[in-house]
Amino acid sequence: MAYSYYRQRRYIPYVQYKRQSGRYTTRTRYSKKGVSKRTTKGKSKAKPAATRVSGTTMQSKLKELDLITKYGKPHKVVLKAEPGELLLSESPADRRYYHVVPVTEALMAYVNQAPEGPKMHAATKELYVTGVTLSLDLFRDCPVEMDIVCGPLASLIECPVKQVKAVGDDFAYNSLDDEGQAKLCGPEDKSVTAAASSFYSKFNSNDSSVFGGTVNSKILPNGNYAAGTNRKGTHTGRVSLQFKGFAQGRGGGPSVNFIKEPVRAFWRFDKTVPISDLSNGRYVILVAVRPECDGFTTLAPPKGSMQGRMYGAFRNMEMDASVRYGM
């Protein structure tokens, strides 16, 4: 730091002036270059940190106010599967890899139960959706692969409507298959066929499954995911996961220890979704899972058995939709 000095004349009382034989004295003072020697009087006028608002914060507040004015206050729609456990099994007779979660049906059920009244229900043709999250716990005793996709069904495609009912402040849907069993569905299921044909432009060339297929990413919302204890990332519509390793005691029996894998997938919408016409723009989530080892399904059941071998289960499956509705 550069310093400069200046000579300053020091004025003294007249009596002392006479004692010094009429001479004034001078002394040298130093100061930092470019820094004023005068100090500001009084306290700082700066606002406290609690009252200062940044430009980014102000923009976010204005955006939130605009969304409330146009679409309403934020709410959460929670949809749970009943029963809460779906068994995972493999059989040579079928390929029970799939499960479909209704999204639009849950949004419709929410609007019908909202306290705004029947007139507003009838006038609501669409609902603003910020995003949709699917969370579940995967229990497995062997390596598995998963595909999870959320998107709109193709227009006028045939797909059974799942019944959604209110359970307290949340909602629930029947997760049983056509035979009334708590298992996944095969590719011949109409809901599975509708979702797979809408989301995938190309299927696996070996077994015609969705695993390794090509999705139509133009119609699918982007988002992020988290799996296991430390796996997370972003996706462009489809979440593809592989879980390696075998559980201790694999092969069935009371001593088997399943590996628990928490899975969460999020899709960002930030747009309005039609809810008055289920034949147009109806959203669902397609979940697919199967056992695998080095890319090939290898877990064959015992000889003579057509029931298949259970290798895991889905538990605590829940869909959360962040929406805006009412004032």
Image: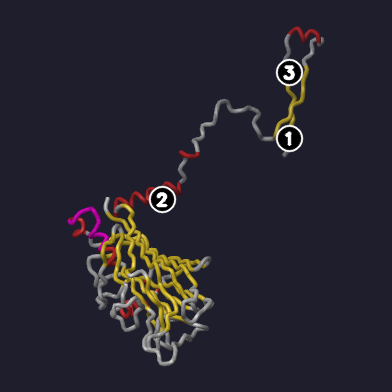
Residue interval drawn in magenta? 109-118
Question: Which residue position is annotated with label 2?
Answer: 60
Residue 3 circle label: 1
The spot of residue 174 in percent (x, y) is 29, 71
Looking at the image, is mark 2 or mark 1 earlier in the sequence? 1
Please state if 142 lies on the left or on the right of 6 as rendered. Answer: left
Q: What residue occupies the far bottom of the structure in this picture?
A: 304
What amino acid is labelled 3 in the image? Answer: Arg
Q: In which quarter of the image is residue 207?
A: bottom left
* Depth check, front residue: 133 or 307: 307
Prevailing SS of the magenta stretch:
helix
What amino acid is labelled 1 in the image? Answer: Tyr
Q: Which of marks 3 and 2 is in front?
A: 2
Question: Which residue position is annotated with label 3?
Answer: 10
The spot of residue 92 in percent (x, y) is 40, 89
Q: Spatial distance from mark 2 to mark 1, Cα to Cα? A: 47 Å
For the residue carrying disc 1, how many other residues have a C-alpha within 10 Å: few (<14), some (14-19), or many (20+)? few
Residue 215 visible from this viewpoint: no
